[in-house]
Amino acid sequence: MQVKRLTVVVTRRLPALVEARMSELFDVRLSETDAQMSREELIAAMQSADILVPTITDQIDAAMMAAAGDRLRLIANYGAGVDHLDVATARQRGILVSNTPGVLTEDTADMAMALMLAVLRRMTEGMAKMQEGVWEGWAPDALLGTRISGKSLGILGMGRIGQALARRARAFGMEVHYHNRRRLHAGLEEPLGATYHDRIDALVTQSDVISVNCPHTPSTFHLLNARRLKLMKPTAVIVNTSRGEVIDENALTRMLRAGELAGAGLDVYERGRGVNPRLRELPNVVLLPHMGSATHEARREMGEKVLINMQTFADGHRPPDLVVPSML
């Protein structure tokens, strides 16, 4: 007797190889347009699926979980971050949640390093001159930036990405400092040459560059608030490749406009696509459209993780990347 395959709904387009493999293993409804689903469409998808495969663009709250009915059994998130999902409510309703940790580490760390270099060396300002055809030639005082070697990097969140960034920063001759919920054990801390700060205030006060690498949770919302941003050196730069909600974006914008900070490199924003228009006007700010993990390799490996989680669940076992509220 043929075993009935689980029904899967995928909210966005995934790499072709991932979609093809998923279709071989499950009864899959793929996204044809890659348009972001509305709230009503998401609820309908949850009601019709055994497994939902959402992405960071799909905000699923407690009310939507309640409206999902009893069919949905697994949310196999395509991505590492799960702050767009109400994990606690899912658990209460017996819905498992999995994610794709680890595969974004190197690419996101690369992007954080790239943003640091772009801001400190004023790369986008130089590119703008070349693209607009207004370069007047080399001059001793033209587009002077800041040397990265010897600078102090403060990493806020020393998980996988923070540690990968620390390795890169050391190779560039930077001093590495960090704050984390828990101090790394010596076997990890010593090879990185990293100095631990148990107080965020101390970290931001002495750093030349702050890199945000912690997730968005209730406890990290506006972790870098106006008061803490005021503690930073006026020559300091802030980089964020994690979650926009960790920084008070209005306070950051005011300080950048007032010259109280030297610059910022942002790949994420407090209001998602609603980027503060005043940030766009500043020459010392580099803005990217959430590109931190945007490599062919990362997207494919994310899909492979989703497949493993789904297949393990279908086989009656706990998904290897199961997310529980205590992890958040």
Image (tube, rainbow, N blue to C red):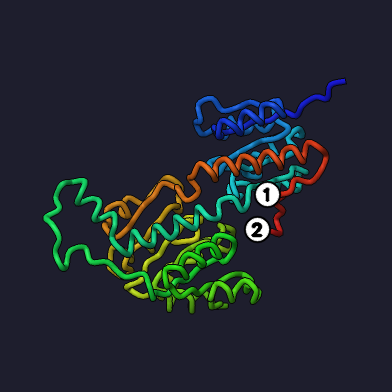
Q: The disc labelled 2 sits on which kind of residue?
A: Leu
| Callout 2 crowding tier (Cα within 10 Å): few <14, some 14–19, many ≥20 | some
Quadrant showing the C terminus: bottom right
Q: Check disc 1 and report the residue beneath it.
A: 87
Image position of 126 (left or right of 170): left
Amino acid, disc 1: Val
**Residue lying furthest right:** 1
- Report helix, strand or loop for mark 1: helix
> Foreground: 127 or 87?
127
Q: Residue furthest front?
A: 171
- Going 51% across and 66% down the picture, which residue do you hit? 167
Farthest residue toward the left? 136
Q: Position of residue 217 (x, y in %)?
A: 59, 58
Q: Secondary structure at mark 2?
A: loop
Q: Quadrant of the N terminus?
A: top right
Q: Kindly report the distance in space between the C-alpha atoms of the residues bearing marks 1 and 2.
A: 9 Å
Q: Picture quarter containing residue 59?
A: top right
Residue 93 in percent (x, y) is at: 76, 43
Q: Residues within 10 Å of mark 1 (few under 14, many from 20)?
A: many
Number of the label disc, if any, that sits on residue 182:
none
Among the two numbered marks 1 and 2 on one chain, the one whose residue lies closer to the N terminus: 1
Q: Residue at x 58, y 70 (%)?
A: 180
Q: Which residue is mark 2?
A: 328
Q: Tags 1 and 2 in contact by the CB under 8 Å rule? A: yes
Q: Residue at x 23, y 50 (%)?
A: 128
Q: Position of residue 171 (x, y in %)?
A: 45, 68
Q: Is there any visible trace of residue 227 in the rendered image? A: no
Residue plotted at (66% across, 31% down):
22
Q: Is residue 68 left or right of residue 216?
A: right
Q: Position of residue 10 (x, y in %)?
A: 61, 32
Q: Is residue 193 visible?
A: yes
